[in-house]
Amino acid sequence: MSFISNLFSGGIGKVADGIGNILDKVVTTDKERMALDNEMRKAEQQFQLENRKLDLQEREAELADTKSARDTASAIQTSANATALSKNTGPYLALGTVALTFILFFAVLFLNKQLVASNTKDVVIYILGVLSAVVTQIFSFYFGSSQGSHDKQGMLNALNSRK
């Protein structure tokens, strides 16, 4: 009985005040909604700008890493003190990986139809995907990257000159 007496003596007032506070927070005027929408748009634009800056910084770090690897390979190739093994290990590994990839592609496509039809098909497809990615990285290392990367590097250089 005390619950019912508490409810009618003051509990309902507290519940009504709580509901009123919630409604005040939820129900707003058109002017308040427009202001909130403007604030949300500004926050979203700021978020997108920050994401673009982070993307450019990440791309800049990737390009610096590639440049460092190329500089290291170039220093080894031109060093008078480097052994024939150290000069040729990278190129031989790259050639071997490319050759292995093309041999595996040829074998899957033309030689062994049972390999593709069997339960190892998913594994073979996965290995071919990994090898294709490695070959792409090898080609971009030795022959430069794509036109898109060249354009991004131009944007990075323009942004760095503004700083």
Image (cartoon, rainbow, N blue to C red):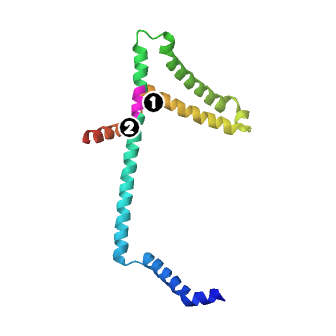
Residue furthest toward the front?
Answer: 2
Which quarter shows the C terminus?
Answer: top left
Look at the image and tell me whether residue 146 can be seen. no
Q: Is residue 27 above or below residue 36?
A: below
The kind of residue on which mark 2 rests is Glu
Which quarter shows the N terminus?
Answer: bottom right
Residue identified by numbered label 2: 60
Q: Position of residue 86 (x, y in %)?
A: 49, 14
Give, as a single range, the part of the protein colored magenta. 63-68
**Mark 2 falls on what kind of element?**
helix
Identity of the residue drawn at 66% across and 35% down: 124
Residue identified by numbered label 1: 140
Residue 16 is a magenta residue: no
Q: Is residue 156 above or below residue 82?
A: below
How many dots with numbers?
A: 2
The kind of residue on which mark 1 rests is Ser
Q: Which quadrant of the structure image shows residue 7?
A: bottom right
Q: Position of residue 122 (x, y in %)?
A: 67, 39
Identity of the residue drawn at 59% across and 28% down: 101
Identity of the residue drawn at 35% across and 72% down: 34
**Mark 1 falls on what kind of element?**
helix
Question: What is the C-alpha distance between the residues marked 1 and 2?
Answer: 16 Å
